[in-house]
């Protein structure tokens, strides 16, 4: 299909990358450039490892972005997020790495990410980052993840 010949993961078998550094985020053309609209990805089963203990950490990530010329190709995003499964990093590092890699890959007009981390040691950690103020006129719904009260 025209405009998609560069994709290496969609439509073929693609192994989970061993690390976020090996993961490739791919982009496709935005079919509505010049229109302000929101794209949301929710990853309620994101996992990574504590860099000190090696124990698993779990998060519900919500990624909102306003595309410019490019959209992130969703299979490559899924593989990128899955690559954190065996990656040791603190919650803050994982959340911001996801957001910043997306910005580098697709240069959105605006992006925000909410990392709602499940508690370890009785304390949940929520991490939020955005590239700046949202564009004027953007319909921006709440991320829909309540403050921790036994999330599930």
Image (spheres, helix red, strand yellow):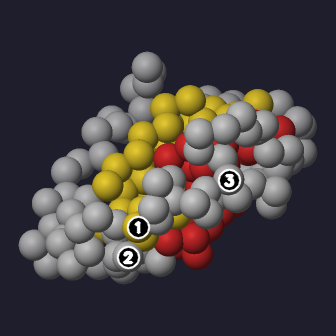
Q: Which residue shows up at 46% across the image and 54% down it? A: 1
Q: In this view, does 17 lie to the left or right of 43?
A: right
State which tag comes first along the sequence, 3 or 2.
3
Q: Which residue is drawn at 19% across and 58% down?
A: 140
Say whether residue 51 is left or right of residue 62: right
Q: In the rendered image of this protein, does residue 11 appear above or below residue 56?
A: below
Q: Are marks 3 and 1 in contact (CB under 8 Å)?
A: no
State whether residue 121 is above or below residue 48.
above
Residue at position x 57%, y 60% from top? 5
Residue 93 appears left or right of 131: right
Disc 3 secondary structure class: loop
Q: Distance between the residues labelled 3 and 2?
A: 20 Å
Quarter of the image where the C terminus is located: top left
Nearer-N-terminus badge (1/2): 1
**Label 2 sits on residue:** 69
x, y percentage for residue 71?
Answer: 42, 62
Crowding at dot 1, Cα within 10 Å, few <14 / some 14-19 / many 20+, comes out as some
The residue pinned by badge 1 equals 29
Mark seen at residue 111: none
Circle 3 residue: 8
In the rendered image, is residue 96 in sight?
no
- Report the residue at 34% width, 66% height from top: 30
- Which badge, 3 or 1, is on the more N-terminal residue? 3
- Percent of width and height locating residue 83: 74, 44
Q: How far apart, in angstroms, are the residues tagged by discs 3 and 1?
A: 15 Å
Q: Is the residue marked by circle 2 packed among few (<14), some (14-19), or many (20+) residues within 10 Å?
A: some
In this rendering, is residue 146 above or below 113? above
């Amino acid at each position: 299909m025209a405009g998609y010949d560069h994709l290496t993961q969609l439509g073929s078998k693609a192994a989970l990358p061993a690390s976020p550094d090996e993961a490739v985020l791919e982009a496709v053309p935005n079919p509505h450039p010049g229109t302000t609209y929101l794209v949301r990805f929710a990853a309620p089963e994101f996992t990574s490892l504590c860099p000190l203990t090696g124990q698993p950490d779990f998060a519900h990530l919500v990624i909102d972005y306003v595309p410019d010329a490019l959209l992130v190709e969703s299979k490559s995003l899924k593989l990128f997020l899955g690559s954190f499964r065996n990656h040791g990093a603190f919650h803050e590092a994982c959340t911001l790495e996801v957001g910043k890699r997306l910005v580098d890959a697709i240069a959105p007009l605006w992006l925000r990410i909410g990392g709602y981390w499940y508690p370890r040691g009785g304390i949940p950690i929520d991490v939020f980052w955005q590239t700046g103020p949202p564009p004027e006129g953007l319909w921006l719904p709440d991320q829909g993840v309540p403050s921790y009260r036994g999330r599930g």
